[in-house]
Image: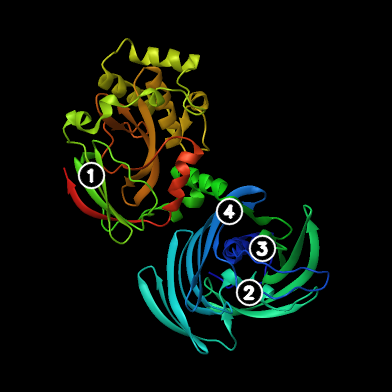
Amino acid sequence: MKSLSTTYRDGLAVASRLLWPALLVLMFLSTFLYSFVASAQTFSPLVGPPLGERWFGIYFNDDRTGFAHVTVKEVPTGYQVASDSSVKMAGFGFSREASVRERYLVGKDLSLKSFQVTQTIDGSPMELVGRVNGKTITLTVELKGNRTEKILPVKDTVYPPAVLNVYPLFKAVKAGTELKVAMFDPEAVAAKQVTITVVGFETVNGSTTLHLRNDLYPFVDNDIWVDISGNTLRESVRDGWIETRVESAADAQAFLSEAAIAKKDLLVDFSLVPVDRPIERPAELVSLTLELSGFAQDLPLLTSPVQKAERLEGAKVLFAIDNALPRDAAATTGEESRDMQPYLAATDRILADTPEILRLKTEILCGTEEPRTAVEKLVRWVADSVEDAITDSQSPLETLAKGSGNCQSHARLYASLARAAGIPTRYVSGIVYAEGKGFLYHSWAESYVGYWLPVDPTFREVPANPTHIQLAEGDSPADLAPLAAVIGAIRARVVEVKY
C-alpha cells in the first residue's frame, strides 16, 4: 500500500487514496466533551478531557457507509482512548473497505504512551502493538502470519490520531494559529507531521463553533467543527465528499445491529466473530458448547429448553445448545402458563393480521392443524420462495413482492405467517456459524409447539442447527440495539461438539 504522501495524478487516484483517510477521519474524531470559553479571539486551554463515549456516522456522497464509536476513560497515568470503526466505500471504479479497532494510552498532555491497533483493509488484517520509549517507538507488526519488530525514531512528542482534534484545545490558540503535530500513522507504520490551522469561530445551526483544518490528506482540505462545549459536530473531507457526523447512541446502535445482522459489506470484517477452531458439518450437530469472551456484562442471557447460558469470570459466557433435550421441558420452565398473546400479535414489521398474509398462510398450510407440521411447511415455503440477498430491512409484504431478502426478511415473513396461523412465534437474533469464516450475526425464529422450537427460514432448518446462539429477542430497533455492545468485541472458543 502506498504512503499517504503519494502524489495524486487523477481523480481515481485521489478517490482511492481518500478511502484510508476516510477511515482515519473517524479515528481522529474526538469524543471528548470539552469545556472552553469562546471569544472572538481566543479561549482558555483545556486541562483535561471529560470522560465518556461518542458515536458517529460515516457518509460517502451523503450515503451512510460506516460508523465510529469512541470511548475515553481516565487511568492513573493519563487517559485510555478506545475506538472501533468500520467503513466501505465505492466509486470511480474502486471499492475499499476497512475495519479498525484501536486502543491508545496517552498521558495527561495527550502524548502517546502505548497502543494496540488491529485493522483489516480489503480483507488483509494487520495488528500493531507498541509503546513510546523516549525518542523511539518500539512496536511489533503482525501481517498475514509474519511477525516483525521495528524501532521508529521520533524527534518530537508524538500523538495518536485519535487526539488530533482535541490537541489545539489544550493550547492558547486563536484564529490563524498554526500548530505542527507529530502523529503516529498506523497505516504507514510511521510518524508524520500534521499541520493544524485554527480557521476561526463560526455559527453553525445557531451554535458557535470552532473551525479547524488540517493537512492530513495532500491537496484535499479536512475541516472540523467543534461547538463551544467541545463537541465535534462534523468532520468533512473535500467539502463534504466524505463526512463524519455525530449522532445519538440509540440511532448508532440501531444502525450497527441492523447492518451486522443484514451482513452489510461495510461491517462483515468488523462483526465477524473469530473462533479458535473450525466446526465440521454444523448442519449435522446435535449439541454445541461454546464460550464467548468479551461479552458485555449488562447484556441479558437468554435461555430456553434448547439453549442454556452461564456467566463465567472475565467477561465470558458459556452457551450450551442441545437439540436433543427432552421436549417436555416446557413443564419445568413454566412456558405452559406464560401469556402467549405477545407472540401472536401483529407489530409494525411482523404483519400477522394483513389480508395477504392471512390468505397466504391458509394456502400454504392447506388445513394442517398439528403445530410442528405447520411450522415445517411454513419454514420450507419461506426458504424456497425467498431468495437470500443482502438488502435493507424491509416489511414482509415487500419481501413477497421482491421474492428476495436478508435473514431478517425471512424471519419476519415466517413469523408473520406463523402468528397468522395461531402459532406463538418470537423473532430472535444472535450469531450462527458460517463454514470457513466464523460466526456471523443472524436472525431466525422460535415457535411454540408445546416447547420453543428454533427454526431458520433462511437456511430451511427445523430445528435450527445448534450453532445458532441467541443473544436478543424482538424485531424492533430497540430490541436489537443491545447487540451493539458485543458486535466487534466477542471471540468464540469451541468447548464441545456432538453429532
Residue 153's spot in the image, x, y percent? Answer: 52, 88
Residue at label 3? 14
Q: Tell me if residue 93 comes above or below residue 27 in the rendering.
A: above
Count of numbered circles in the view:
4
- Disc 1: CA contacts within 10 A as few (<14), some (14-19) or many (>=20): few
Q: Give residue 457's quadrant in the image.
A: top left
User: In the picture provided, is 175 more to the left or to the right than 498?
Assistant: right
Mark before the other along the chain sequence, 2 or 1: 2
Q: Tell me if residue 304 comes above or below residue 343 in the rendering.
A: below
User: In the picture provided, is 84 more to the left or to the right than 456?
Assistant: right
Q: Amino acid at mark 2?
A: Ser
Q: Tell me if residue 265 comes above or below residue 167 in the rendering.
A: above
Residue at label 4? 89
Taking depth in this image into account, of 387 and 8 the one nearest to the observer is: 387
User: SS at mark 3?
Assistant: helix
Q: Amino acid at mark 1?
A: Arg
Residue at label 1? 281
User: SS at mark 1?
Assistant: loop
Q: Is residue 35 visible?
A: yes
Residue at label 2? 5
Taking depth in this image into account, of 328 and 434 the one nearest to the observer is: 328
Residue 142's spot in the image, x, y percent? Answer: 39, 72
Alpha carbons under labels 2 and 4: distance apart: 21 Å
